[in-house]
Amino acid sequence: MATPNLFSGDPLDLPISILEVGIAGRLELITDHQKCNGSSFPLTTNPNGLPPYDVDLSCEVIQRYLADPEWLPIHHFDHSHRSWPQGKNVHSLYHMDVSAPHMDLSMERNAATGELRGINEGSINYSGLSAQNSLSLRRPPGPASQSVRGSTSNFPFWPGGMDEPTLEQIKDTGDKQEALDFEKDLLSVPPGWKHGMDFNQSDILHPTGVIPLTSLLGTLEDFSFGDSSEEEETTETNDRTKKRVMKTEGLQRSNSLEELGVEAPTTPAPPSVSPATDAPQEQWAVSLDSNSSVDDFYKRIPELAFKHPFELDPFQKKAIQCLEAGSSVFIAAHTSAGKTVVAEYAIALSLKHMTRAIYTSPIKALSNQKFRDFKITFGDVGLITGDVQLYTGASCLIMTTEILRSMLYNGSDVIRDLEWVIFDEVHYINDAERGVVWEEVLIMLPDHVNIILLSATVPNTLEFADWIGRIKKKKIFVISTTRRPVPLEHYLYTGNSQKTQNQFFLLQDAFGAFQTKGYYAAVEAKKERASKYSQTFGARHPHGGGAGQDKGTWLSLVQSLRTRDALPVVVFTFSRTRCEQNAAALSTVDFCTTAERSEVQTYYTKCLIRLRGGDRQLPQVLYMLDLLKRGIGIHHSGILPILKEVVEMLFSRGLVKILFATETFAMGVNMPARTVVFDSIRKHDGSNFRDLTPGEYIQMAGRAGRRGLDNTGMVIILCKADVPEMSDLHKMMLGKPTLLQSQFRLTYSMILNLLRVEALRVEDMMKRSFAESRTQKDSKTHKQRIKLLTQKMADMGDIECSGDLADLHDYFVTVQELICTREMLHKRVVESINGMKCLSIGRIVIVNTEYHSWVPGIILQVSSDSSNRIYTTLVLCEKRREQEVNQVEKGDKLVKKAPLPRDLLLSKVFRPEGPCDYKLLKLHSSEIVILTGKTLRVQADKILNDVARSQTPRFRSELLDELERLRFLTSDQSLSLLPEYQQRINVLRTLQYIDDGGAVQLKGRVACEVSSHELLVTELVLDGALSPLAPEEIAALLSCLVFQHKTQCEPRLSDTLKQVTYTGNAITIIR
C-alpha cells in the first residue's frame, strides 16, 4: 500500500488552487501540490470547460431598451426615402391662442321678400362663458356624460323671475358684504414686521401745479359744458337765499292762544305721514270657471297635439287652451277626475315642438306607473330615479322631485330644451320632511320653463298660485273642480260573521249628505250584538278585537263584497304588520279562476327572470306568489321594489281582487278599484296616534269608483270594536281639506349648493319661499313707500337751529320723553281699580282724538275686554255743513285738516260756534283726557310760527321711524329663518366646509354630492372612518341613515363600528 505524499514544508507555503466541479460553476479549493499549477485560472474537471451563457433578460432589457435605445430600428433613417431635420422655431414660444370674438354680424332682411337691407354689427356679451363660470343659457353645453344629471362643479341656470343684478348692484352688494373701512381696517404693518407704511394724509405732498387724481375724479360729475352754467348757479343761489329769508321772516311769536284753536295755521304744515293710496297689486293667480262650457274649443284649436278617445270635460278643455297659449296652470281636482289628461297633452305639445317635458312625482311607485303608461302612449319616454335610469335621452322624462332638484343645482343641459315641468300630487308639499324640495324646485326653475301643477282639492289654491306667479313673474291660471266624476257612498260595517255579513249602514250618500240615521243604526247593531254576547258568555264585552274576531270580520266582509260584485277592493291599513296579518286571515279564500292563476304564474315568473337564482327562492318572493295566485296582494314599503311593481301591474290587469296597502298606494297611483275599505281611521304620524285628516281620507277614499265602469264608488269603514264618534266621522268626511302650507327649512345641502355660486344668495332663496310669501307680498309697495318717504325727507331740508331755537333738538327729545311718560302714567291710572270706577257709564269726559280736540262727552257703554277696553262715548261736535253732507253721501273724501300740535299746546274745552250735533265714538283709554280748570294767555302768533318749526323734528322722527320699519320689512333681517341660517353658516365654518369669506372648500364640494345627512357622511368619508370597515359593515352602517322603522333589538357593534359612532356623535355635538 502506497503511502500518501504529504507536504513537509512551511504551512504558509502550502500550494492552493481553485477547482471547477461539474458544469454548474461550483468552485472548490484543493491543496494537492502535485496538481497545483500555480496559475490564477481555476482547474476544471470538464475537459471542454463551462458552456457559454446569456446575460440575464431583465438586465438586457434595461441595457438595450432603456439605457441606450438608439439602436432601435425606428431611429435609423438609412433605408428611408428621405428625412427632414427637425428645426428650431423660437418664435413659436410667443404664440397665444386667439380669444373668442366679441363682435358679431347680423343680416337685416325684409320679412316679406327676404331682400337684404343691411348688415349690423353687434357685441357678443356671452363670449368665454362655460358651465363653471356662468348661469346663462347661452353658455356652451357641457360634456355628454354630464348632459342629464349635470355636475356639482357646474353653475345652475339663472332662476326665472329673479332679476339679474346690474354692475352697480353687484358693487354695492360686495361693499356691504365686505364692510371694509379703507381708513381704519387696512393693515399698515405686515405680519412679523416691526414697522410698516404710514398712510397719514397730512404728510402727502403734491407738486406745485399738480392736481390730485382722487380730487379730480370726485368732481367729474359736477362738470357742466353749457354756456349758462354760471347763470344757473347764480339763479339757484338766489332761490336758496330767498327761501332762507322767507323762513327767517316766518319765525314770529303769537300773542293769543284763543286764536290757535279757531284759525287755521298760516304756515304750510309738513306733509302728512299717512300712507298714500297704493296702486292695486297685480294679480298673478287667475281663477277660471271649471263648470262653464267651452263651445268654441275645436274652433280655437283645430289641430290638437293629442286626441283622446273620449269627450273632454270643461276643465280639461280650458286647461288645454292655456297650454296652447304657453301659460302655466294649476289644476286642483278630485281623485280620478282626469288630471292626467292635462299632463298627457303637455307631453304631446313638447313632442310637437321638439322640446322636452319632465313629469315629477313624490314617490317611486307613481313614477314607475306613469313610466309604463306614458311609454305605451308616447313611446319616447325615459325614467330616472335613485336606482334606475332608462332612456335618459327621451323627450319626456319621469323622475322624482329630488332628482329634478339635483339637476337644477348641477346645471343639467336637459334644462335648456325643457318646455314643461309637471308636478303631480302638489299637496305633498305639506310633508314635513320632503315638502321643502317642491319649493326649491319651483324657485330654481328658469324663466323659459312652464309649470303644470296637479293637486287634490285644497282650499288655498289661489294663494299658492299667486306665490308661484309672483316669484316667477308669470300668470298662473287656476282651475278647480267641485264634484267627482264618480260619486262615492260611505258605509259603516259592523259585521263579523256569516249572520251579520250584510250589516252595511249608509253614512254619506252620493250627493254628500251625512246620514245620521245610518250612524245610529250602526250603533244599535253593535249594542244588540254586545247584549247577546253578554247573555251567552257573561258580562265581558267583546272589545278585544283579537286575531279570531278580525279573521271573522274579513271573511264575512269579503264574502259580502263578492256577492255584491264590489270587487276589486283596496284595503288601507296603517301598519305593515297589519297588512300581512289581514292577508293571512284570508288564507282559505281563493278569488282566482284556473286561467287567472296560470296567467299570474306565467307573468310572475317572467318578471322575476332578472333576479338571481338564489334570490328567487327568498321567503318573501315565494309567499307573494302564493298570495297572488289566490288574487290577494300586499303593497307597502317593506316589500321588494320589483315585487311591488309586479303587484301594481297585476292589479291594473284585474288579477288582484283584494289588495292590502298602506297610504302610499293612494299617492297618485292611478289604479282605481270598485271599493275602498279602511281597516281603521286612526294612524300614527311618527309622534302620536290621531284621526285621519279630511285631506288624507279624501285622498284614499278617492281610489274607489272606476270612471266609465262604476256608477258609484263604495267606501267602507270597519267598526271592529265600537263605532267611532259621529263628530269625528263628520269632521273627517265633510271637513275642509288641509291648507297648502310651507315646510321650507334650511338644509346644509341647499346652503352649500348656493354658496358655490356667488350670484345666488341663500337670503334670496328664503325670501322667495312660500313661508315668506305674506311678508314679501307687499315688498314692492314698501319699496315705493321708501322712495316717497326718502323724497319727503330730502324736500324737508336741514333744520336751521340758531339764536333762540338753538336748543330745538334737545327740546324735541325732552318733549318726546315727556309724552311717552305721560302716556304710560295715563295708561296705568286708567287701568287701575279707581280709574276703572271713574270711567263708568254716565261719566262725563273730555275726548282728544285726531278729528275731535278737547271735546266733552259722556260714556254710554264699556266693553268687557280687559286687554283692549273700548268706551262707547257720545261727544259734542258742530253740525256739518250741507256741502260736506252731500260729499259724504256721494262717497267723496273730505279734505283732512292740518293736524294741530294737540300734545304740546293745551286749549280750552271745545265750544261750538254754530248749530250743535252729537256723534257716537268708539274710544280707547288713551283718547280720554283728564283736564284741569286752568287756562293760559300766551302770544299765539309766535307760538304758531314756532310750532311749524317744532313740528319739523317731530315729523322727521316719524318719517325716520316709518323708513326704518319699511327698510326692515324689505331687508334680509326680517326673514324668519335668518338666525338659523347664520348658525348653520357658523357650523360650516367650524367644520371647514367654507372659509371665512363664504367660499366652498373641498369638504363642501364633497358634501354637495351627498343627498342626505351630508355632513355626517362627508366627515366619515374624509376622516377615513370607513377605510378599516368591511363592505358589509359599511352597508350596515349607512343603512341606519335611511332606516325608519322601530325595533326592539339592541345593536351589537364591533370595535371599529364603535369608533365610527364617536365621529358621528362629534358631528352631532357641533351641529
Image (spheres, rainbow, N blue to C red):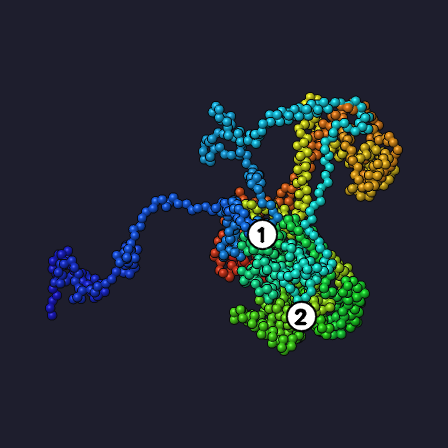
Local packing at callout 2 (Cα closer than 10 Å; few below 14, some 14-19, many 20+) is: many
Amino acid residing under circle 1: Ala
Q: Residue at point 52% right, 48% down? A: 106
34 lies above or below 1020: below
Residue 940 location, quadrant: top right
Residue 94 location, quadrant: top left
Q: How far apart, in angstroms, are the residues tagged by discs 2 and 1?
A: 66 Å
- In this view, the residue in front, 1032 or 143, is 143
Instruction: Look at the image and tell me in which quarter the N terminus lies.
Output: bottom left
Asked if the residue under mark 1 is in contact with the one under mark 2, i.e. CB atoms within 8 Å, the reply is: no
Image x and y of residue 855, in percent:
84, 33
N-terminal of the pair, mark 2 or mark 1, is 1
Decide if residue 897 is on the left or right side of residue 225: right
- In this view, the residue in front, 91 or 169, is 91
369 lies above or below 228: below
Query: What residue is pinned by disc 2?
Result: 658
Q: Residue at point 73% right, 28% down? A: 948
Local packing at callout 1 (Cα closer than 10 Å; few below 14, some 14-19, many 20+) is: few
Image x and y of residue 23, in percent:
21, 66
Decide if residue 459 is on the left or right side of residue 1056: right
Q: Secondary structure at mark 2?
A: strand
- In this view, the residue in front, 319 or 739, is 319
Furthest residue to the bottom?
594
Amino acid residing under circle 2: Ile
Residue 1050 visible in rendering:
no
Query: What residue is pinned by disc 1?
Result: 112
Residue 803 visible in rendering:
yes
Q: Residue at point 66% right, 43% down? A: 780
Residue 303 location, quadrant: bottom right
Image x and y of residue 730, in percent:
76, 60
Q: Which mark is residue 966?
A: none
